[in-house]
Image (spheres, rainbow, N blue to C red):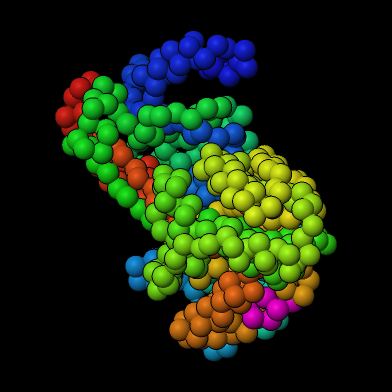
Amino acid sequence: MDLFYHPNLPLPQRNKLRQLLEDRFGFQRERSDAATADILRVTMGCASACLDPAFVSTSTEAFLLQRICDTLTVFDPRKKTHLPSLAQAWENNEDGSNWTFYLRKGVRFHHGRTLTTKDVLYTVQRLRDVNSPSRWQYEEIERVEIVSDFAISFYLLQPNRLFLHFFSSFYMSILPHDVAFSERNLIGTGPFRMAEFTDRVLVLEAYDDYFRERPFLDRVEFWFMPVHMEKDLYQLPDANPAKLDGHGDNGEIESVMDGCQFIVFNFRKEGVQRHRSFRKAMRLVFDRAAIIEELKGNRISPADSFFPENSKQTDVEKATLQEAKALLRESGYAAEELKLYYWNKKEFHDDARWIRNRGEAVGLRLSLHPVHLTDYYTTDADQEADMLVICESLEEDTEWGYLRLFQDEACFIRRLLDREQHAWLDRSIRSLAMLISPEQRARILDQIERRMRDEDWVLFGYHMNKITQYHPALHGVTLDSFGWIDFSKLWIKKEMLAQTGS
């Protein structure tokens, strides 16, 4: 593996080495004197991930974290309700200002100790202590009472009907209080335990004492690769590539990602981007229908909302650039070069170049600046960017997903809006949290999104799909809210087991 990472390795040799490596990936069966292990090796075309629950910032990181750790509750997107997880039950008073959780007994962390309410308290306190961008969820906690080892009560400063949502979020992955936190030796209660975590690989092993069903797979290895690997993540050895082009007998799942690609303007920085006419001109430059038609790929439909279902209610037509020139003049734009930052992925690099080229047609000068995953919290985009191209994915719990977009200090919408906008958002969210009716809460979320759209705080771009192909011998295939296959539920048909040697 070290050779593959060598910066001076010629491309032909790199491609040959990649083919050799791919033969070692997918489903493997390995024997030892003690036992036979079912192993899945997958590649990830990204740098190493952050697995500190307090600072998870991408869907990939959230997905991996949720294989190692559990939360008190989980959200069921079909029933639109919360289900028990580490908490077997909960209750709240009439106005939602007092919440009590009752933990399952006998749940064990990966280091062997039984879960208690001290671990829940430690997890909440840690988010505050490390200054997590998610701490807004817990700032209204006035005090916490440990009733017993398996019952804990939270008393809030004011009613909050959304409090239950916070305890199903990946930020609230429960950690043990008696072990110093280490991201490289993360301990949770999940179906897999961390066996190894370096800049090159994350190795997870099935946890035999998991309080739910033990995974079929004994080990899963995620190899962080410096280049894109073309082979699908969930293949099996000796799979016929001809059957993996979307027309064979392979399994295939197409999912539309909840969320969208968009541009957000930097209202914290002085400049022409704060002028309404400039943002209107950018709305015409950033033509949603045209970028989908010209760049294609996984860009499937124009966005007029973060949520795909809401976007279906709006017809988006191609824009003309003639009006954009007039709006630029009206804004006072004087041909100065503006900084367009973008999330450092190929599709967003293509988007940024497309926007820059289209802007040149109306005299708009843009310089392009990638934001790398490793620089997510340290990038100078907050101070230097005039605008940012990015994508946000909403969780299955879309109500909490919206709150995270608007309140979480790690999200670029929050990072680039000014104090006045923050104050308005905070007032809106506080009023929403006190409402019992989901329909009433949805109306407030619609109002927030409508103002962002109508005043061009953000320019909605497009929704994306994800097509996941997998070998037909793989069963138990389900997708999480981010489009990832949940490998804790995968199992292999006996025909494939026979081929690999049972």
Where's residue 427, x and y in %?
Answer: 69, 81
The quadrant in which residue 330 appears is: bottom right
The x, y position of residue 341, in whole percent, is: 68, 48
Determine which quarter of the picture holds residue 94.
Answer: bottom right
Q: Is residue 275 visible?
A: yes
Looking at the image, is 160 positioned above or below residue 54? below
Outermost residue, right direction? Answer: 270
Secondary structure predominantly adopted by residues drawn in magenta: helix
Chain part drawn in magenta: 423-429
Q: Residue 24 vs residue 353: left or right?
A: left
- Magenta segment: does it hold 177? no
Would residue 386 be found to the left or right of residue 254 on screen?
right
480, 260: nearer the viewer:
260
Q: Residue at (29%, 23%) from the top-left corner?
A: 237
Quadrant where the C terminus sits is: top left
Q: Measured from the top left, where is residue 337 in percent x and y?
A: 77, 49
Residue at x 57% of width, y 88% of height? 95
Q: Is residue 167 visible?
A: no
Nearest the camera: 88 or 241? 241
Residue plotted at (52% across, 58% down): 287
Counting every numbered tag in the picture gives 0
Frontmost residue, 101 versus 312: 312
Tell me which corner region of the image, top left, top right, bottom left or bottom right, holds residue 196: top right
Pick the residue in front: 125 or 46: 46
Residue at the farthest bottom position: 94
Q: Residue at x 46, y 41 (%)?
A: 192
Residue 419, image x, y percentages: 78, 71
Report whether 448 appears left or right of 89: right
Q: Is residue 486 above or below residue 217?
A: below
- 403 lies above or below 253: below
